[in-house]
Amino acid sequence: MSEALQIILTVLRQAWVALTVFVVSVGALAMLVQVLRTIGASTIGARIWVYESLASIAAILVLVLVAFLGVPPVVKAVSASVPGSAGCGPISELGMFASGLIAAIVGVRIILSFARAIGGAALGGTTEISQALIEAIEALIGMLLVSVVIPLVSMFIGTCQ
Amino acid sequence: MFPAFAANVFQSITIKVIVSSTFLFDDGGTTGGIFAPILDQILKLCRDLWGVLVGLVIIVATLAMIISVLRGAGGMMIGGSKETTVAVIGVVGVVLLVVIAFVAIPQLANLMKSLTPAAPF
C-alpha cells in the first residue's frame, strides 16, 4: 500500500511543479497584458480602465504571492490535522493511505484553484476569481471534515479491541 | 529629434527585455515528470504569446507617444498650455509603462520563479 501511495504522490508532486510553472508563466503574461491595456487606456483618456488595469496587476501579484508563500504552510498544517494511523489492523494502513492521498489531492486542487484565479484576473473575470477561491476554501474545509471522519470510521468499524 | 530618441529608447528597452525575459526560456529547472510534454507545449505557447505581446506593447506605445506629441503640438499652436502639459505627461507616462512592462515584469517573474515552492506533501 505504501508503494502505491508513493507512486501516486510522485505523480501529484509532478502535477504541483507543472502547475507552479504554469502559474508563473500565466502571471507574467497577464501582467504584460494589463500593462498593454493601461497604455491603450491612457492614450484614449479612459481613466477607469487605467485604474482597473493597475488594480489587476496588483491582484495578480498578490495572488501569486499567496499561492507560493501562503498555500504550502496551509496545506502542511491541514494535512497534519488528518490522523495518519487511525485505529489498528487493516484500517490503520488504509487510513495512512487515505490521509496521504487526501493531503496531496487537496494541495494540487488548491494550487489549481489559484491558477484559475490568476487566469481569471488576467482576463478581468471577477466571477472566475471568486469561484476559484471558493473552490480552494471548499477543499480545505473538506480536508478538515475528513480529519474528523477517519477516526469515527475506525471507531465504527471497531477493529481495535 | 523626438522619433530618433524614441527609437533609441525602444532599441535599448528591447535588448533589455530579451536579456531579462529568460524566465520563459529557462526550462532547466522544471521537473514536470509525466506532465513535462504538456508543460513544454504550454511554455512554447507562452513564449509565442510573450513575443506577440511585446510587439503589441511596442506598437501601441509608439502610437500613443505619436498621439501625445501631436496633441502637444496642437496645444502649442493654439496656445493651450494645459493641453501641452497633459501631452508631455502622457509621453512620460507611456515611457514609464513601457519600462514597467519590459524591465519590471521580467524581474517580477524571476522573483515569482525563485519563490516557487516544492510540493508540501
Image: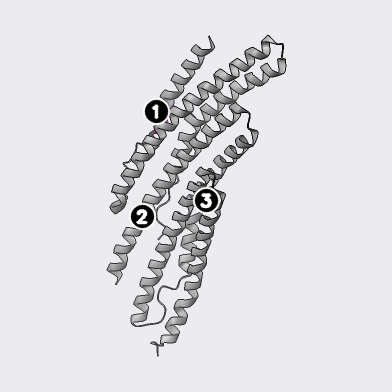
Q: Using the image as rendered, state which of residue B89 and residue B63 is in the foreground.
A: B63
Mark 3 secondary-structure assignment = helix
- Report the residue marked by disc 3: A66
Image position, residue A41 (x, y; %): 58, 31
Q: Is residue B106 left or right of residue B43?
A: right
Name the chain under label 2.
A
Q: Using the image as rendered, state which of residue A51 and residue A143 is in the foreground.
A: A51
- Image point 38% across, 71% down: which residue? A98
Badge 3: residue crowd in 10 Å (few <14, some 14–19, many ≥20): few
Residue B114 seen from this side:
no
Cα separation between marks 1 and 3: 28 Å
Q: Which residues are magenta?
A: B17-21
In the image, residue A151 above or below residue A122: below
* Mark count: 3
Q: Are marks 2 and 1 on the same chain?
A: no
Q: Which mark is residue A69?
A: none
Name the chain under label 1.
B
Give the residue type that dot 2 points to. Answer: Ala
- Report the residue marked by disc 2: A15
Badge 2: residue crowd in 10 Å (few <14, some 14–19, many ≥20): many
